[in-house]
Image (cartoon, rainbow, N blue to C red):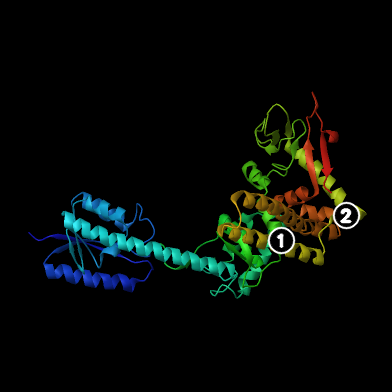
Amino acid sequence: MSKRAALYFRQSLDAQEGIERQRERCSALVSARGWVVVGEYIDNDTSASKARAAGTAWARLLDDATHGRFDVAVAVDLDRLVRSTRDLVTLADTGVGVLTVDGEIDLTTADGEFRATMLAGIARFETRRKGERQKRANTQRAMKGLPHGPRAFGYEPDGVTIRESEAVELRAAYRAVLAGASLGAVVRDWNARGIATSQRRYKAGHEGEPAVWKAQTLRYVLLNPRNVGKRRHHGEVVGDAAWPAIVDEATWLGVQAVLSDPTRLSAARGGKYLLSGLAVCGVCGATVHGGGARRVGQRTYRCSESTGHIARRAEVIEEYVGEVVIARLSLADAAGLLTAETGVELQALATEADSIRARLTTLAVDFADGALTGAQLRVATERLRGRLGDVEGRIAESSRADVLGPLVAADSAREAWEALSTDARRQVINALATVRIGQAGQGAKTFRPETVAIEWKQ
């Protein structure tokens, strides 16, 4: 009786020619044996060093082997089929035979399993050694500030040259976020205008098409230090990059501060509430969130810690806060609110931040070389990170001018305020003041301004 053969093809890169060559060689071998091909299993663009989980052709091959749907698994060579002793044992437990272009291995015998184990062990060794070399090479590239990985939005494929058509959009996105726009608003605008991402999606029917923008994707791009000319390695900035910056460090740190603000998430949960997550409870100091209306159609602010502390109508409080903010921005001394660092001061702060990051990298190298103990590394790192946080905070503080500047410069602060979206108004309030909402008072039927305190930030 003719044996039933299952052909397995795998390669690390997505290139159909490689799969075709494997098919030709395996098919010729099976035909020469007079066997019948009952199925093909293709893992294209699948690295040997990565686990082949459920949903892969390898997983289907094992399932079909377990259920006796074929007799022999055929591949060009053993390391195309298995790259670890774990894979080998899993395949051997199914009881199927293995045939490669280089020769047949009978996994049902001790000799065959021993030979296969030796070959799989060698393949595993080669994979591990290649991975170690690649890690060392990547670290060296990072320390030199050289690019690595797929094309980044805003840059050409060489990773160094700025693609100005995308850089213009990126700078506009930074300005929009600093001015209070949501990531969703920027994403909707980009998708509507056909601004393509730098990545491509590889799904059936969509081969090579640009992926659409999502808020989380934009967030990652805006927070990427490559846009400010810094090289990141394993999540840490390790120094200056070989490519030019698209935005200045003050802008990047300002957006970083905005996107890491927990009140943005609070606002998202509470819907379009002006003060949700920004205002605090006048009783306990906890944040105030929108929701929990006492009547249908009535928006309400409540303390996040206790529903018994405050429950206030949102509309009247938001109107009052808006009027106070307009009045403050209309004063003659409003320009004094723009306390951004000067260009010279910002450059000095950026230089100091670079120096601290370089010292952190040196400490890590010294520890790896045995020049520092773990305790010494922790003490020195904590001190430097504390100083780095202070410096980055001062740089980020200059973003206050980006938020308040347009309103201070406007002929009419009221018109400028009314033209802002809710997100932008939240940014202004967050830059200007802390709003403390107190209890309305027993039996109160009208709004009393003294129950809402507005504490101006310095």
Q: Residue furthest front?
A: 371
Residue nearer the viewer, 362 or 304 = 362
Classed neighbour count for the residue bearing mark 1: other residues with Cα under 10 Å, few (<14), some (14–19), many (≥20): many
Q: Kindly identify which numbered label has been placed on residue 353.
A: 1
- How far apart, in angstroms, are the residues tagged by discs 1 and 2? 31 Å
Report x, y in % for residue 288. Answer: 71, 37
Q: Residue furthest right?
A: 332
Q: Kindly identify which numbered label has been placed on residue 334.
A: 2
Report x, y in % for residue 384. Answer: 69, 54
**In the displayed structure image, the side of residue 352 where residue 49 appears, left or right:** left
Q: Is 103 situated above or below 94?
A: below
Q: Nearer the viewer, mark 1 or mark 2?
A: 1
Q: Check if mark 1's residue and mark 2's residue have beta carbons within 8 Å.
A: no
Amino acid of disc 1: Ala
Q: Kindly identify which numbered label has been placed on residue 343.
A: none
Q: Is 294 situated above or below 139?
A: above
Residue nearer the viewer, 350 or 187 = 350
Amino acid of disc 2: Ala
Give the quadrant of residue 245: bottom right
Q: Which comes sooner in the sequence, label 1 or label 2?
A: 2
Give the secondary structure at mark 2: helix
Give the quadrant of residue 416: bottom right
Q: Residue at x 12, y 67 (%)?
A: 33
Give the secondary structure at mark 1: helix
Report x, y in % for residue 85. Answer: 30, 55
Residue nearer the viewer, 19 or 383 = 383
Residue 224 visible in the shown view = no
Residue 25 visible in the shown view = yes
